[in-house]
Amino acid sequence: MQTYTYVSKGKFELTEKPKPVIMHERDAIVKVTLASICSSDLHIKHGSVPRAVPGITVGHEMVGIVEEVGDAVTHVKPGDRVTVNVETFCGECYFCKKGYVNNCTDQNGGWALGCRIDGGQAEYVRVPFADQGLNKIPDEVTDRQALFVGDVLATGYWATRISEITEDDTVLIIGAGPTGICTLLCVMLKHPKHIIMCEKDEERIHFINEHYPDVLTISPEECETFVKNTSDHGGADVVLEVAGAESTFRLAWECARPNAIVTVVALYDKAQSLPLPDMYGKNLIFKTGGVDGCDCEETLKLIAEGKINTEPLITHTYPLSKIEEAYDLFENKRDGVIKVAVEC
Ligand SMILES: [Zn+2]
Ligand SMILES: [Zn+2]
């Protein structure tokens, strides 16, 4: 089968590999129908994910059809249309039982697919702990509507859940990339008083203004003043930092009112400083990533009910045979790209 493979630092290549087989009784083999490219794939490509194993098939955001299941799998069966969770988790350890599935202590726990084991930019993928990692897609939901459930939408949903948003709040979201927009869609379900999105890219600002006209948008330079003028208590009640740029961590806590919650979803290239003397007395509450992706059933339900729609994020579609072109477009942010769907 065709797979897109991490060969070495800076090099991904379409290669031929044997179709995966069941290796454990809790595995499933999924025939991938649609996959997507995530910025984490680019992090692997550029060597900034040290645990990524050269030779693995990349891709951790996909949907497909169950082809085969191991003897211990009970929640899905061959023929089921499913989303695949970015995280592999056992469902049984201390952290899994608490819902902190990102910290699953199994050796395959956490982000394994498309990083430490073969992922989904391929015709087939083997999914360990299939009962945890696969969710059945309701009949009324299309593959395209469900494509982001396992990764970027899971992240946005989780970030919103831990941010304790109320209807009186002014919520600032920093970064209007795919994860930022998914976060926005989930924040909108909480009906806060104001939602402000801070973004430097004009095309992305345009996308937000066009699709979500009630959302206020602002550039990073004007953000702090704008947020302070727009909110009731001298700053945002909740800040979600999804950008991960050079100065966005600082911007996040500077825009927060005293006693605000600052949720840091972003993955930074470099260490960030927490200048406690500068923020002394602000009494901020920081919450940090990564995602505990265990709400996929709930998000699929919200999609089926028409409450979440991530389909507009798919701006481009390519066949697997042209995935190279898809990466080029996505990496260079050409042609207003938000997300790419890859037909496998
Ligand atoms: Zn991802
Ligand atoms: Zn676990």
Image (cartoon, rainbow, N blue to C red):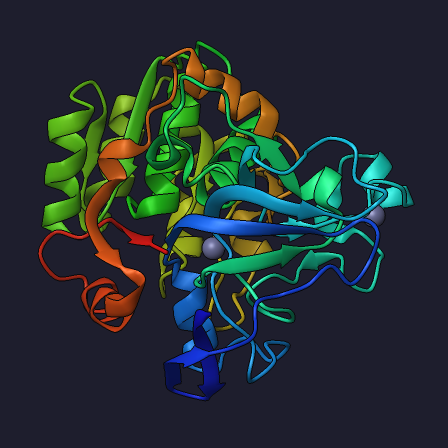
Whether residue 204 is visible here, answered yes or no, is yes
Q: So how many labels did they put on this image?
A: 0
Query: Relative to 253, is 226 on the left or the right?
Result: left
| Residue 166 vertical position relative to residue 98 in the rendered view, above or below | above
Residues 221 and 263: in front is: 263
**Residue 250 appears left or right of 65:** left
Q: What residue is shown at x 62% (from left), y 42% (from top)?
A: 287
Q: Horizontal and vertical percent for residue 342?
A: 31, 55
- The quadrant where residue 173 appears: top left
Is residue 234 visible in this depiction of the protein? Answer: no
Q: Give the image location of residue 265, x and y in percent.
A: 51, 48
Q: Position of residue 34 (x, y in %)?
A: 38, 48
Say which residue appears at 52% left-offset and 66% top-offset.
272
Residue closest to the eye, 69 or 36 = 69
Q: Quadrant of residue 167?
A: top left
Choose between 215 and 272: the one closer to the eye: 215
Q: Is residue 231 above or below residue 268?
A: above
Q: Is residue 35 left or right of residue 207?
A: right
The C terminus lies in which quarter of the figure? bottom left
Instruction: Say above or below: 306 vs 153.
Output: above
**Percent coordinates x, y for residue 68 in the rendering:** 66, 47
Residue at the spot x=18%, y=52% of the render?
337
